[in-house]
């Protein structure tokens, strides 16, 4: 009994000593550099209080509009969404000092690379205007090998490849084609296994993949398509309205860490974020809509699920919302991180 009482008395001390390791995390920010930003920025974010440090320039780069970290956080990869010199850049990243050094860059051979993802030893870029997918073999030092290209556009139909998302089993990737209203299942490096057709005029953009279901946000229709993974590829199960005012600018989609709620951003009219409750069968029920600043693009949820941060490109800020864990609803905190044209948010240590 005495030993138990001693442990109970020590418990608050142990919690207070351990918690700072998890409270502060790093936010890495991709931007467009046409108006004042110089590249990739970083700041510290306290996921308990919602406080943050001022953004600091991590590395200069031309319009690094999307970023991703290697699993061990030793390497950072960023597209340069420039029509003159579309590139993918590899950086050696130090999470302790929060510094980055360029290793090498490779051309994507496809215009407007707008998304980057890592899968089975390859880095991939989605080339929006180019209508193509580029694969780069990752070398042992984190550098990029020579690009391999898969073209989806045809003389009859222009593809707009927008996103790359790993399947739940990690064996393939899903690639969204906004121009052809399709989602492709690709096996590394560039073997097409299956095509799922989405309702005409939808404009597939971003996805989030859960264990049994996947959810796709469609830019033009403003609908969230519910998809089921099967041996024959993805199957459409249903669709749910996120944009109800015809803005035709839906952008990003994420699940809460506990999988109970889904969020989708909408732009160009009544800018904001939709909140959905995820039912037991995977279907969605829209329960709230939260207004944001102008042009909410990419957004992200803190690992502990307490805050949702929205990159508002045309408001030149990252707006901070607090999540109610029980209801899933968002509450404005009145806090925002000022930065020119933020468009991508990822978390690091």
Image (cartoon, grey):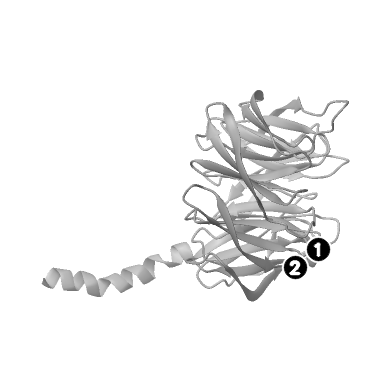
Numbered badge on residue 314: 1
Residue 287: tell me if it is visible: yes
> In front: 227, or 5?
227
**Residue 262 location in percent, x, y?**
57, 55
**Residue 186 location in percent, x, y?**
63, 28
- The residue under label 2 is 293
Q: Quadrant of residue 209?
A: top right
**Residue 176 location in percent, x, y?**
70, 38
> How many angstroms separate mark 1 from mark 2 (CA)?
8 Å
Q: Mark 1, residues whose alpha carbon is within 10 Å: few (<14), some, or many (≥20)?
A: some
**Which numbered disc, 1 or 2, marks the residue that appears first in the sequence?**
2
> In front: 90, or 164?
164
Please tell me whether mark 2 sits on a helix, a strand or a loop: loop
**Residue 321 location in percent, x, y?**
61, 69
Q: Residue at x 79, y 53 (%)?
A: 248
Q: Residue at x 87, y 42 (%)?
A: 83
Q: Quadrant of residue 333?
A: bottom right
CB under 8 Å between callouts 1 and 2? yes
Q: Residue at x 61, y 26 (%)?
A: 188
Q: Mark 2, residues whose alpha carbon is within 10 Å: few (<14), some, or many (≥20)?
A: some
Residue 278 higher or lower than 123, as above or below: below
Residue 119 higher or lower than 251, as above or below: above
**Which residue is the extreme one toward the left?**
1
Q: Residue at x 82, y 55 (%)?
A: 33
> In front: 111, or 158?
158
Please tell me whether mark 1 sits on a helix, a strand or a loop: helix
Residue 105 higher or lower than 334, as above or below: above
Please state if 4 lies on the left or on the right of 180 as rendered.
left
Numbered badge on residue 61: none
């Amino acid at each position: 009994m005495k030993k138990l009482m001693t442990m109970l008395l020590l418990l608050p001390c142990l919690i207070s000593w351990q918690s700072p390791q998890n409270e502060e995390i790093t936010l890495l920010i991709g931007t467009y550099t046409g108006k004042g930003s110089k590249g990739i920025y970083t700041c510290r974010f306290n996921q308990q209080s919602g406080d943050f440090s001022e953004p600091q320039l991590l590395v200069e780069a031309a319009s690094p509009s999307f970023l991703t970290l290697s699993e061990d956080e030793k390497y950072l990869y960023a597209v340069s969404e420039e029509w003159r010199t579309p590139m993918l850049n590899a950086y050696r990243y130090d999470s302790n000092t929060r510094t980055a050094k360029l290793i090498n860059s490779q051309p994507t051979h496809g215009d407007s690379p707008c998304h980057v993802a890592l899968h089975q030893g390859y880095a991939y870029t989605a080339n929006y205007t180019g209508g193509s997918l580029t694969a780069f073999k990752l070398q042992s030092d984190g550098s990029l090998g020579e690009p391999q290209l898969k073209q989806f556009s045809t003389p009859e139909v222009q593809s707009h490849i927008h996103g790359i998302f790993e399947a739940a089993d990690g064996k393939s990737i899903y690639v969204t084609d906004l121009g052809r209203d399709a989602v492709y299942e690709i096996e590394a490096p560039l073997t097409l296994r299956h095509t799922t057709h989405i309702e005409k005029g939808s404009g597939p953009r971003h996805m989030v993949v859960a264990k049994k279901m996947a959810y796709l946000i469609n830019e033009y229709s403003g609908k969230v398509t519910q998809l089921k993974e099967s041996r024959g590829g993805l199957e459409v199960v249903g669709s749910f309205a996120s944009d109800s005012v015809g803005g035709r600018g839906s952008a990003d989609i994420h699940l809460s860490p506990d999988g109970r709620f889904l969020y989708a951003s909408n732009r160009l009219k009544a800018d904001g974020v939709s909140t959905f409750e995820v039912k037991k069968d995977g279907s969605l029920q829209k329960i709230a809509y939260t207004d944001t600043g102008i042009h909410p693009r990419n957004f992200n949820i803190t690992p502990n699920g307490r805050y949702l941060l929205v990159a508002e490109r045309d408001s030149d800020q990252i707006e901070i919302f607090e999540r109610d864990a029980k209801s899933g609803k968002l509450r404005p905190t009145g806090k925002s991180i000022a930065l020119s044209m933020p468009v991508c948010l990822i978390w690091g240590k």
